[in-house]
Amino acid sequence: MKKTIGIALLALTPLAQAIEYREELAPPNVAFFVELLGTRTDYNNLGGDDAGGFRLRLGLDLKDVKVGGWMLRAEGALNQFGQTRKTITSSIDPIPGIDPPNVDQIIVDVTNQLRLSGIEGGLRLYDNRFFYVRGGAFVYSLKSRREETRTDVDINGDPISTNEQTPQEETISGIGPYLGAGVEFQLVESVKGVAEFNVYQADGEMLNNLSLGFRFSF
């Protein structure tokens, strides 16, 4: 019986040591954060205007992971960059034999309506004081609508007739990179103000994006 107990104790010794070692391991030094940001996006490269939107970002401070003197953060966000609607007006000459002879000019109004949304995921390097840089991938959905109206006018500029073309709608989904930089400053305990500038790629075009908001640490 004593021999059996001795063998059992020897067998349990490594397990006891493993349990003791596991208890001595310190928990990972991480902190969660949430950011709520208002955004302003320039749609000019896609034929639109500026539009306001918002970003909800969740992230993790990896305090023990250093790149040089910079702390690493992992983050993901939901973006709703808002809707823009822009009308461009131009004029063209009538085509002899096709357009009526009393038409002096044709006024063309083209309206582009755009809405961009998506999710992003990436990494951030923070200098532990004030400044950070960020980058990652943006999975987006770009909805567009194009409306065209042609107005025939006479030599006095008075309208003769109006022709509205059938609107063209399209939704493009894709993935593109984003890069950005920002600053954060303490307001109260666990709350910071955030200001950042980002560049997102959507449908092959680069879109400038400004953001202002708050960071909540947990």
Image (tube, grey):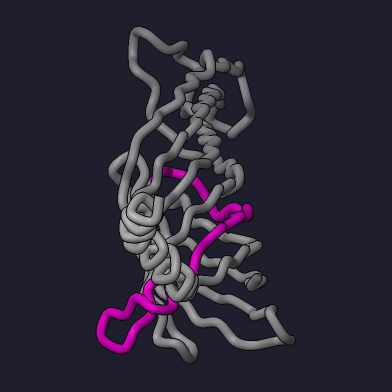
Q: Quadrant of the C terminus?
A: bottom right
126 in the magenta segment: no
Q: Position of residue 154 (x, y in %)?
A: 55, 26
Q: Position of residue 82 (x, y in %)?
A: 60, 46
Residue ID at (56%, 58%): 58
**In the picture shown, does residue 102 fall above or below 2?**
above
Q: Is residue 161 left or right of residue 73?
A: right
Q: Farthest residue toward the top?
A: 97
| Residue 174, picture quadrant | top left
**In the picture shown, does residue 62 fall above or below 47?**
below
Residue ID at (48%, 70%): 23
**In the picture shown, does residue 217 fall above or below 187?**
above
**Is residue 180 something one can see in this rendering?**
no
* Front residue (pair 186, 88): 186
* Front residue (pair 140, 7): 7
Q: Position of residue 191 (x, y in %)?
A: 69, 78
Q: Farthest residue toward the left?
A: 68
**Is residue 131 something one can see in this rendering?**
yes
| Residue 92, picture quadrant | top left
Part of the protein shown in magenta:
46-72
